[in-house]
Amino acid sequence: MRRIAFFGGTFDPVHIGHLTIAERLLEMFGLDEFVFIPAFHAPHKPDRPPTSAFHRYAMLCLATADNERIMVSPIEVEKGEKRYTIDTLAELRERFPDDEIFFVMGADSWTDIRTWREWEKVLTSSNHIVVSRPGYELSTGHVGQEIAKRIVDLRGCDDTRDRLQKGEHIYLTDAVEMDVSATDLRSDLSDGTLDHPDSLPPKVAKYVEKYDLYM
């Protein structure tokens, strides 16, 4: 049985913060694979059309090409329409029936989880890993007592493998933090004032320049 983590999002653009999460969680949770799932159009971001799904998928492929354990799945992009996490999780269960699945989300998504379609079912359909993010608390009161029983608090722990439990659980960790903002990157690229050029993987930076994205 393989242990696979899936990380969904717009990744507009993918940045070093995303890759750091993938690399760190691979080791912390003893994962066999880490898979990015770019959304065709995220349901919780209806007001801002993202960069085309093709470009975002291509940038992810470039960013992950050098690590054979980190992959990109077109499972949402190929649908060509808005897709909800509950539906994606159901399809992943069908495709990987014998594997242990972990769904990764940032603290911002965790904070807003009650706005997701069938959010309680989402949280009980697989394991989840919630990573910290500046400005957001990894609180638990908003999910209710029944869901809270599934939470395993790993904050302060660097090596988590011995603390993983059987069944579907929600693991909170602050050992890795998404401290780069795609929103800020888009704004900086648009203004031509990218303060931290190393926030973008080199291949992604060249791709952005080649196709004049975010300009």
Image (cartoon, rainbow, N blue to C red):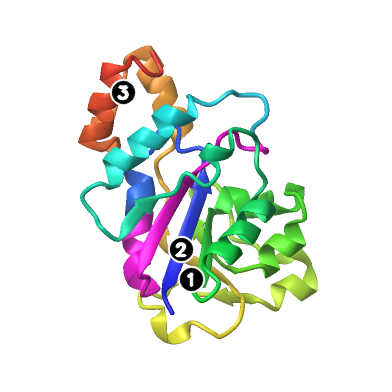
Is 5 placed above or below 156 here?
Answer: above
User: Along the line of sight, which residue is nearer the eye, 154 or 47?
Assistant: 47
Mark 2 nearby-residue class (10 Å; few <14, some 14–19, many ≥20): many
* Image point (61%, 49%), residue name: 109
- Disc 2 from disc 1: Cα separation: 19 Å
The answer to whether 7 appears left or right of 41 in the picture is: left
- Look at the image and tell me whether residue 15 can be seen: no
The percent position of residue 6, horizontal first and vertical second, equals 48, 58
Residue range (magenta): 21-44
Q: Is residue 50 left or right of residue 26?
A: right
Quarter placement of the C terminus = top left
Point 37% across, 64% down: residue: 33
Question: Do residues under tags 3 and 1 come within 8 Å of each other at their CB atoms?
Answer: no
Residue where numbered disc 1 is placed: 155
Say which mark, if any, is on residue 43. none
Q: Is tag 3's residue or tag 2's residue first in the polypeptide sequence?
A: 2
Q: CA distance from mark 3 to mark 1?
A: 36 Å
